Image: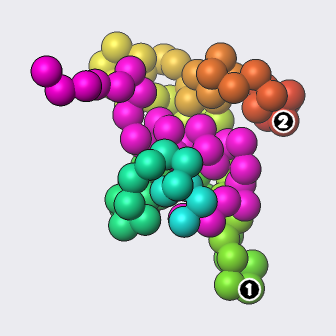
Amino acid sequence: MAEWMFLTNHAHVLLCIAEDPNSRLRDLASRVQISERAVKRIVADLERTGYISRHRFGRRNRYELHPDIPIHSPMTKTLEVGALLALLVPMIATRMA
């Protein structure tokens, strides 16, 4: 039987960005244990849907989290992504306050 994860790779990448907004794609890929190409697609998805913004500083990116965006799901449409992140990573709650 194939293994499954409770959180998606999108959620894992978002959690990593919330913990370190200066993360490189290579670092994110290593932490989530997926390819850099997959991380690049996920970051583009998160940016396109408004969960993050990317700001360029020289050759590096800094990601800005938008915690007030609702989670796109029929079951959680009233839950903001910041509330979920605060539950999963308590140190993020103090940063978003």
Quadrant location of residue 24?
bottom right
**Percent from the top left, x then y, of residue 18?**
67, 42
Q: Identify the residue shown where x is 84% and y is 35%.
A: 95
- Bounds of the magenta segment: 1-25
Q: Identify the residue shown where x is 73% and y is 50%.
A: 20
Quadrant location of residue 35?
bottom left
Say which of 69 and 15 sits in front. Answer: 15
Residue 19, magenta (yes or no): yes
User: Left of 27 or right of it: where is 90?
Assistant: right
Q: Which residue is mark 1?
A: 58
Give the SS element for disc 2.
Answer: helix
**Percent from the top left, x then y, of residue 33?**
44, 49
Residue 85, magenta (yes or no): no
What amino acid type should be assigned to the residue bearing mark 1? Answer: Gly
Q: Which residue is mark 2?
A: 95
Q: Identify the residue shown where x is 60% and y is 60%.
A: 27
